[in-house]
Image: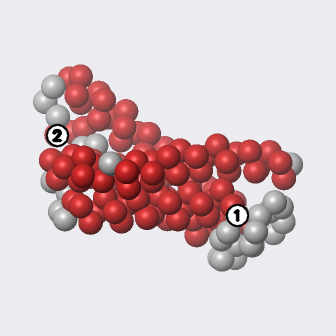
């Protein structure tokens, strides 16, 4: 079972680590896009988001306080859904649909990350991790 959980952690974390790389490698373009969405201090927000993605993704991947890493991903995903994908503001049907898909993806991933938080914080024998959970319930 440990290997199955490890494979799941790898697959889940790769999405966020790839996105973190994009936040750092394409910082200027992402900051311009965030600014067009009305995000205040967009350049700093992009860097902060990249840090959350990197720390959260590595934490889940390596099993270093993976419960905290899962929470970091939730902290990134929920505000991103509302700030970057406000489908309710779109007038064009196609743009509205694309933003709704992105919004729902972020909310769904936040739900999965929140479940991982509970899993990591609750299960006593995680196996194949570097540390145990930071939180215990």
- Image point (17%, 53%), residue name: 35
Give the quadrant of residue 94. top left
Q: Quadrant of the C terminus?
A: bottom right
Judged from the image, the secondary structure of the residue bearing numbered disc 2 is helix
Q: Which mark is residue 63?
A: 1
Q: Which mark is residue 25?
A: none
> How far across and how far down the image is residue 88, in percent?
21, 39
Left or right for 117, reference 98: right
- Image point (29%, 35%), residue name: 99
77 or 119: nearer the eye?
77
Characterize the local packing of mark 1: few (<14), some (14-19) or many (20 or more) Cα atoms within 10 angstroms: many
- Image point (24%, 30%), residue name: 96
Alpha carbon distance from label 1 to label 2: 39 Å
Which numbered disc, 1 or 2, marks the residue closer to the eye? 1
**Please, is residue 110 above or below residue 43 in the view?**
above
Judged from the image, the secondary structure of the residue bearing numbered disc 1 is loop
**Number of numbered tags placed on the structure image:** 2
- Image point (59%, 60%), residue name: 58
Looking at the image, which residue sits at the far top? 94
Nearer the N terminus, badge 1 or badge 2? 1
> How far across and how far down the image is residue 10, in percent?
67, 48
Characterize the local packing of mark 2: few (<14), some (14-19) or many (20 or more) Cα atoms within 10 angstroms: few
Give the quadrant of residue 89. top left
| Residue tagged 2 | 89
> How far across and how far down the image is residue 104, in percent?
40, 39
Left or right for 71, reference 22: right
> How far across and how far down the image is residue 46, in percent?
31, 58
42 or 124: nearer the eye?
42
Coloring applied to the structure: secondary structure
Residue 82 can be seen in this image: no
Left or right for 69, reference 10: left
């Amino acid at each position: 079972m440990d290997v199955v959980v490890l494979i799941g952690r790898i697959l889940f974390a790769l999405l966020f680590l790839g996105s973190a790389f994009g936040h750092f490698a394409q910082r200027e373009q992402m900051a311009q896009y965030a600014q067009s969405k009305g995000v205040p201090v967009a350049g700093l927000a992009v860097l902060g988001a990249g840090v959350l993605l990197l720390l959260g993704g590595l934490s889940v991947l390596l099993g270093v306080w993976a419960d905290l890493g899962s929470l970091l991903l939730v902290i990134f995903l929920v505000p991103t859904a509302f700030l970057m994908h406000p489908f309710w503001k779109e007038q064009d049907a196609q743009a509205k649909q694309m933003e709704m898909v992105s919004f729902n993806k972020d909310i769904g991933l936040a739900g999965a990350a929140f479940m991982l938080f509970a899993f990591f914080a609750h299960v006593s024998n995680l196996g194949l991790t570097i540390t145990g959970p930071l939180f215990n319930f």
